Image (spheres, helix red, strand yellow):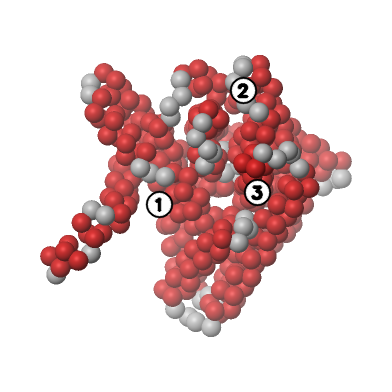
Amino acid sequence: MVDFLYSHLPFFRGGAFMDLYAIVAIILAVTFIVGYLNDRYLHLPQTIGIMLVSIVFSIGIMFVGHFVSADVLSAVTTFMASVNFSEALMVGMLGFLLFSGSLHINLQDLHKKKLEIGVFSVLSTVFSVFMVGTCTYFISKALHLGISFPYALLFGALISPTDPVAVIGVLKAAKAPKSLEVKIAGESLFNDGVGVALFIGFSEMIAKGQSLSLSRLLLLFCTEAIGGALIGLLFGYVTYRILKKIDNFQLEIIGTIALVMCLYTLSYKWHFSGPIAIVVAGIFIGNHGRAFAMSDKTRVRLDDFWELIDDILNAVLFVLVGLMLLTLQSSWSVFWIGLLFIPVVLLVRFVSVAIPVATFRFMKRAVSPGLIKIMTWGGLRGGISLALALSLPRGKEQELFLTITYVIVAFSIIVQGLTIRPLIKRELSL
């Protein structure tokens, strides 16, 4: 039987399928080893610890490559170059991670905070995109980097959205109060769809050589966001109706997997926002589906399954983020520029949060203590920003933005992620 497979099926002879299998096997093995080291010695929250160990591992590989054997560095760098991080995250992982995160968002809590979440995820994100883009343009001029204003806005679009994968993981570890968690997690689940829509719009204008058109951006945003929400609601409802007619937890779990994969694929094909579609479907299934279409046994098994998927993909994602350090080609001067952008991005985040919060207070709406500080410091950037930076056409802009984004993401996950819990405790105890 084995001889037959090797002789008749090409993917058993080292073809594309076996290459993909080998890549996944190596990544999972590295993830297991890195996770073991964190669990055994560092005892940090899983996502933060895994990324930190991966970065240390990358630095170690670079040290060995420069001072011991260049072949080691070459082999690992070649392997990392074979991993399409942008496609792996935006197509392979993101739908599953967003569905897992949105599955446990309480619709009633979300409805109570709909105004805050809507303002933070849409208006604050749009404000941040243009403010970061403007700052990037003037910093570029001061440093003679030669970045045009459209490309500066493109950077603003990829760095402004907070990453729901990173944010939700850190909030769980920080044990944030429910009302605060709903605001921050709700914002992060929706604002990446806004950022991606603007990113696509700016990319199209640059590719076609068009000038900035607010009407075109608005049309694209409405198509992506509203279309994504509607298709997510439709697919979520159809799946709910099917789940309601069966009582078989294995089949129901398969149904949710099919929902994520089919919905994300069709959203991409129809030019709707896949992230927004998945979040809407996940919230619908997590609330209406869990309440009216699932038995207690199915709910438990479904939660266990998606929590496991979330943990595995999170671990793999942050290993890849850590190892991406090996693929950066920029000089050390660009890393210093990346450090310069950290306070810029944080300051813009602070202003984009402070203005709505001040407005809410003026409207006499309840505002959590220390909300501005917590949302500013808890607005983590992660893999989505890196994936968007990698999707840029090769050139000086991609090289520059990728390195700057990596520095911001590393600072965000490690420094902000490790300090958000004591900040929450301090602010809420005042």
- First reached walking from the N terminus: tag 1 or tag 3: 3
Q: Eyeballing the image, is 133 above or below 192? A: above
- First reached walking from the N terminus: tag 2 or tag 3: 2
Residue at (44%, 70%) from the top-left corner?
254
Instruction: Rate crowding at label 2 as few (under 14), some (14 to 19) or many (20 or more) other CA atoms within 10 Å.
Output: few
Q: Amino acid at mark 3?
A: Ala
* Circle 2 SS class: loop
Which quarter of the rendering shows the C terminus? top right
Q: Nearer the viewer, mark 2 or mark 3?
A: 2
Residue 331: tell me if it is visible. yes
Q: Amino acid at mark 2?
A: Gly
* Circle 1 SS class: helix
Residue 408: tell me if it is visible. no
- First reached walking from the N terminus: tag 2 or tag 1: 2
Which quarter of the rendering shows the N terminus? bottom left
Q: Nearer the viewer, mark 2 or mark 1?
A: 2
Q: CA distance from mark 2 to mark 3?
A: 25 Å
* Circle 3 SS class: helix
Q: Position of residue 247 (x, y in %)?
A: 48, 80
Left or right relative to 168: residue 202: right
Tag 1 residue: 312
Residue 288 position by quadrant: bottom right
Q: CA distance from mark 1 to mark 3?
A: 28 Å
Q: Amino acid at mark 1?
A: Ile
Tag 3 residue: 197
Residue at (69%, 22%) from the top-left corner?
138
